[in-house]
Amino acid sequence: MVLQETHRGDLPPELDDPLFWTAIGQFDGALEHAGVGADVAEVLRYPERALSVAIPVRLDSGSLGVYPGYRVQHSSVLGPTKGGIRYDVAVTLGECAALAMWMTWKCALLRLPYGGAKGGVRCNPRTLSATERERLTRRFTSELLPIIGPQKDIPAPDMATDEQTMAWMMDTYSMQVGYAVPEIVTGKPLSVGGSALRPEATGIGVVTVVEEGVRRLGWALRGSVCVVQGYGKVGAVAAHELAARGARVVAVSDIAGGVYNPEGLDFQALDAWRSEQDGIAGFAGAQDVTNAGLLELPCDVLVLAATEGQVTGDNAHRVAARVVAEGANGPTTLEADEILAERGIVVLPDILTNAGGVAVSYFEWVQDIQRLFWGPDEIRTRLRDLMRDAVARVWALADEEGLSLRRAALVTSIREVAEALELRGIYP
Ligand code: NAD
């Protein structure tokens, strides 16, 4: 916290955002252990490049909406930058900068040849029609053209963006260059160069890390009681995978609230209800629970797969899980992290736990460039091996140096990037 205060004035005020300060606070905490040179550390505190745009969109009503959009590239030391695009009312430049920095650490941790980026548009995606979202996406992609490219920066889906969004981005880029360029984005539908298992990859990765983590803590996932916040692309797959591996998933939620059944949720019935009702609220096979209440339910594993800043100094004292798995990016604040550590609750950190998505995005990009596609079994095996290898390295460092898993993950990543930066040197 002291370091955070000391450095606050040194950084660009336009990045001032609670999430960016969380990222910087974590970085500064890890630096004490990383043993990297001061110059290299100073370079890595800043995003390399940030673009801010205004996106005019003709709405279905005939009126015009103008939405702020951003793309931040944190580091291209290890390769082209990579990261999602989100549509959300809370998107800011500083939030994108934090998420871009975490993408750098995530890619380095998995030894993928990428740096980190992130982008987004500040809008309420739930009030936009499909045609409005298409116009928004195509115009945003056009605005990003100077800085994205298959060897420069490769976007992917994030909150409230999906395969369709990626297909529109791929098409817009391809129309500009005059030929199909599937490798410009990942997370595409299969028919335009997507990869098997990409939609499920982040959720599968989360559960792989949870399984490995609880095994190392001396218990088994089978029979464990699990709670999942956020029943979206990451959370729904994680909940299904947990149930498939014998865990009892008792509660899940979306932005409107959650459902809780201490006997375990029936996912077939819940998913049928969700597709009929466009949400999970009111599901008859469970009782309602608020998102705040869901975070405090007694369980073995609490998966946070909604959004950032969910476990804070206010509620961390009441979290009643043995393990917190960060499927979302930045769901635990710095203060909450300390409280959970004091209480002996193990946090499986985001840059490790949700890295399955970018791992299979990397596979997708490699397949697109080669025009040679792999089957789901091969991808599942490669993903599992990458995730297990990263868990093993993080766990070993945590044990050797007496660090939390978050700090061990960050130290591992920072060392990877710092070594490459030292060798490349500062240009010119
Ligand atoms: P999504 O939009 O598909 O799902 C988000 C879910 O969380 C939805 O159910 C939504 O209703 C719920 N939600 C949103 N805000 C909430 C709030 N304030 N309280 C409770 N629930 C809320 O998004 P996603 O792709 O599943 O992403 C979820 C998180 O995982 C984000 O932090 C994202 O950055 C991270 N992530 C996603 C991927 C990926 O491959 N999609 C990869 C790595 C990390």
Image (cartoon, rainbow, N blue to C red):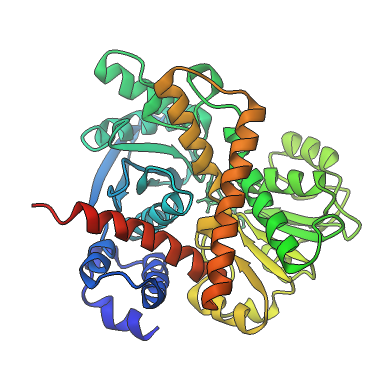
Q: Residue at x 24, y 65 (%)?
A: 40
Is residue 146 visible to the viewer in this orientation of the structure?
yes
- Residue 190 position within the rendered picture, expressed as x and y whole percent measured from the top left: 55, 21
- Residue 174 position within the rendered picture, expressed as x and y whole percent measured from the top left: 32, 19
Q: Is residue 167 above or below residue 288?
A: above
Q: Nearer the viewer, residue 332 or 280?
A: 332
Q: Nearer the viewer, residue 305 or 193?
A: 193
Q: Residue at x 75, y 50 (%)?
A: 281
Q: Nearer the viewer, residue 385 or 343?
A: 385
Q: Residue at x 49, y 70 (%)?
A: 407
Q: Residue furthest left?
A: 428
- Residue 88 position within the rendered picture, expressed as x and y whole percent measured from the top left: 46, 49
Q: Quadrant of the N terminus?
A: bottom left
Q: Residue furthest right?
A: 263
Q: Residue furthest top?
A: 179
Count of numbered badges drawn on the protein: 0
Q: Is residue 414 left or right of residue 240?
A: left
- Residue 129 position within the rendered picture, expressed as x and y whole percent measured from the top left: 50, 32
Q: Quadrant of residue 82?
A: top left
Q: Residue at x 43, y 67 (%)?
A: 411
Is residue 233 visible to the viewer in this orientation of the structure?
no
Q: Is residue 402 above or below residue 232?
A: below
